[in-house]
């Protein structure tokens, strides 16, 4: 019982690092790594975004 209690902390820490559970930070890909991965896979890395702005105001506003 003592050994399992002693081993629980490092095992829980490794579990959290592997899954991101408990607020641990997982490393992410940088932009350069994503571009290189898409270039290697042959997927399209460009796409068009459409942004629309709405300038309506409520009836009670001046």
Image: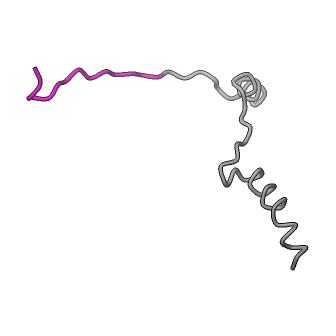
Which residue does the image show at 73% across and 22% down from the upper left?
32
Viewer-closest of 35 and 23? 23
Up-down relation of residue 32 to residue 16 (above or below): above
Q: Is residue 44 left or right of residue 51?
A: right
Total labels: the figure holds 0
Q: Start and end of the magenta stretch?
A: 49-62
Viewer-closest of 4 and 38? 4
Viewer-closest of 38 and 61? 61
Task: Point out the image quarter for the C terminus.
Answer: top left
Asked where in the image residue 12 lies, by quadrant, the reply is bottom right
Asked where in the image residue 14 lies, by quadrant, the reply is bottom right
Up-down relation of residue 60 to residue 8 (above or below): above
Q: Is 56 one of the magenta-colored residues? A: yes
x, y percent for residue 46: 59, 21
Up-down relation of residue 32 to residue 21 (above or below): above
Colour style of the rendered protein structure: one colour
x, y percent for residue 1: 87, 79
x, y percent for residue 58: 14, 29
Q: Is 18 one of the magenta-colored residues? A: no
x, y percent for residue 8: 82, 66
Asked where in the image residue 10 lies, by quadrant, the reply is bottom right
């Amino acid at each position: 019982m003592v050994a399992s209690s002693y081993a629980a902390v490092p095992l829980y820490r490794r579990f959290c690092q592997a899954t991101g559970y408990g607020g641990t930070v997982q490393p992410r890909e940088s932009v350069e790594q994503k571009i290189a991965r898409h270039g290697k896979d042959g997927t399209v890395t460009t796409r068009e975004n459409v942004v629309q702005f709405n300038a309506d105001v409520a009836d009670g506003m001046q």
